[in-house]
Amino acid sequence: MDVRSAQPRTAALTAGIGMLAMTVIAAPVNFALIQNMIVPGGAEATAANLVASAGMFRLGALALLIVAVLDVVVAWGLYEVLKKVHPGLSLLGGWLRVVYAAIFAVSITRIFGAVRAAPADAAAALRLAEHFNDGWMVGQVFFGLHLGVVGMLALRSRFIHWLFGALLVIAGAGYLIDGVATLVSPGYGVELAMFTFIGEVLFMFWLLIRGPRLQAV
């Protein structure tokens, strides 16, 4: 098998494995660990949580940095898989995910700052922790746009079932609406992405199962 014929297959499998690893790491770290330690409006409670579990909090932040790196890997993999549909749009989709990863990585640094500030300045610790959430919401806007582009490319392709494309567009819309609405209205708490993310999951399995059988460009 020559290198050229293996490239789209390798890229699809790489993207699928990357998405699977991100799911395994990010969900428990962010929702079960970090978000449970941040008490909205409760500076003293948040600082106490950070001081009591500083080591776990730092490990969680490091795990999220790994997720940000994996996002870049997935961006490359999806670009390689979809560039034969439309090179320009595929490149745009890849860069949107890279921008999301960069914003996410910068936001994660606020977690380390919150841990350092917690013992002496509870208000600063809460503010930095909230900055992480704000940055993540900004990143979700770009992530939603990325999924929308990937979904449109899937819809235009001849090798991906249209249903995957439609579900990816819906998933992207969920992230986009959540991100914009949260930034515009802090009281927003619908979290559409909790219901629309299924497109991501199904496409991940498509990459893992169908991807290794893709033909060369």
Image: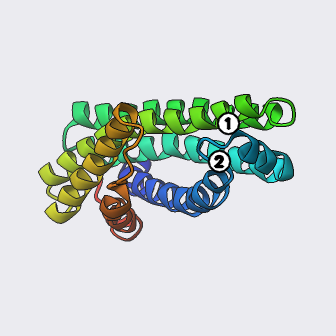
Q: Secondary structure at mark 1?
A: helix
Question: Type of residue at label 1?
Answer: Leu
* Label 2: how many Cα within 10 Å (few below 14, some 14–19, many 20+): many
Protein image colouring: rainbow
Q: Position of residue 23 (x, y in %)?
A: 52, 60
* Label 1: how many Cα within 10 Å (few below 14, some 14–19, many 20+): many
**Would you say the residues marked 1 and 2 are in contact, meaning their CB atoms lie under 8 Å apart?**
yes
Q: Residue at x 14, y 61 (%)?
A: 162
Give the farthest residue toward the bottom.
Answer: 209
User: Is 71 on the left-hand or right-hand side of 87?
Assistant: right
User: Is 107 on the left-hand or right-hand side of 112?
Assistant: left
Q: Residue at x 78, y 46 (%)?
A: 50
Question: Type of residue at label 2?
Answer: Ile
Give the quadrant of residue 215: bottom left
- In front: 190, or 203? 190
Q: Position of residue 174 (x, y in %)?
A: 29, 50
Above-or-below relation of 92 to 19: above
Above-or-below relation of 146 to 18: above
Reading the image, the residue beneath label 2 is: 38
Specify whether residue 94 is in view: no
Above-or-below relation of 188 to 108: below
Reading the image, the residue beneath label 1 is: 126
Placement of the N terminus among the 4 image quadrants: bottom left
